[in-house]
Every structure is written in structure tokens, then in C-alpha cells.
Image (tube, helix red, strand yellow):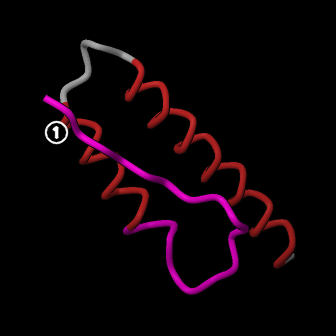
Amino acid sequence: MARTVKARLNRIEKLILSRIEEMLEDPDTSNGDVLKAAVFFCDHFRDDRDVGSEHVEVRFTE
């Protein structure tokens, strides 16, 4: 059961990361919206558990 839960969390995590990437590529998305999504991701998915080697880097340019 723990494996199933971890697999589901990993799929959800990948979906959120792909959405953040889409937001970064969309010129109509504000920096604030991207920041909110990144903070949500970090608060809910980046804890002490092993989630692999992927990471999120967000840079804002004006």
C-alpha cells in the first residue's frame, strides 16, 4: 500500500511540475501566479521523503 501511495504522489508531483513549466513558458502568466504554484509545490511535496533527483528552479526576469 505504501508503494501505491508513493507512486500516486510521484505522479501528482510530476503533473504539478509540468504545469509550473507550462506557466513559465506562457507569456500571459504573471510572476505571482508562478510563484504561488512553486510555493504550493514546495509546501506540499518537498519534505524529507525521497522524491528523486528532480528539482525546481524559478527565475524571474523583468
Q: Residue at x 76, y 69 (%)?
A: 6
* Disc 1: CA contacts within 10 A as few (<14), some (14-19) or many (>=20): few
The residue that label 1 is drawn on is 32
Question: Which residue occupies the foreground of this view, 21 or 9?
Answer: 21
Left-right relation of 34 to 49: left
On screen, residue 23 above or below 20: above
Q: Position of residue 52 (x, y in %)?
A: 73, 68
Q: Is residue 59 magenta?
A: yes
Q: Place residue 28 in its image quadrant.
A: top left
Q: Which stretch appears magenta?
A: 43-62
Q: Position of residue 15 (x, y in %)?
A: 61, 40
Q: Residue at x 25, y 46 (%)?
A: 35
Position of the N terminus, as image quadrant, is bottom right
Question: Which residue occupies the foreground of this view, 4 or 18?
Answer: 18
Q: Is residue 58 magenta?
A: yes
Q: Position of residue 55 (x, y in %)?
A: 56, 59
